[in-house]
Amino acid sequence: MQEVKVTVLGGIISDEELQMYINRGRRQQPRNELVEITVKLDGDFVDIDYKYANHIMPQRFSIGGDMIIENFESLNSAKQAEFLDKTTNDVSGCGIL
């Protein structure tokens, strides 16, 4: 595991708080290496930007309009097949596009 490049803007934070943000970034994408973190302080608010070695976008799938999952592999094989068999509605004739 390589060292994480850290940039803090707008103030100073403790090493303990910074380590919590780094650990959070590693937990968010455990299979992807965290390489950089930018912490932007704004009063009581903190914006955190994480950069990973492989720029993998988080996956979100909508299942039947009532369930959102983060990870396709978390579905059992029957639900995966059901999701892959779905077809999209044709909107070309409705004036939206």
Image (spheres, rainbow, N blue to C red):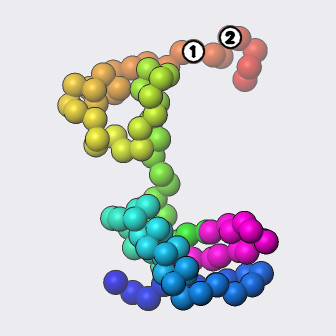
The span from disc 2 to disc 1 (Cα, nearest Å) is 8 Å
Q: Is there a contact, CB below 8 Å, between mark 2 and mark 1?
A: yes
Residue furthest left in the image: 77
The residue at 74%/68% (across/down) is 44
Q: How many marks?
A: 2
Callout 1, which amino acid? Asp
76 in magenta: no
Name the quarter where the N terminus is drawn.
Answer: bottom left
Residue 95 lies, in percent from the top left, at 75, 15
Dividing the picture into quarters, in which one does residue 30 lie? bottom left
Residue 4 lies, in percent from the top left, at 48, 84
Foreground: 38 or 97?
38
Callout 2, which amino acid? Gly
Q: Main secondary structure of the magenta part?
A: strand
Residue under numbered circle 1: 90
Mark seen at residue 82: none
Secondary structure beneath label 1: loop
Secondary structure beneath label 2: loop
38 in magenta: yes
Residue 27 lies, in percent from the top left, at 40, 65
Query: Which portion, as a residue range, is magenta?
Result: 36-48
Foreground: 86 or 22?
22
**As drawn, 30 above or below 41:** above
The residue at 43%/73% (across/down) is 23
Mark seen at residue 93: 2
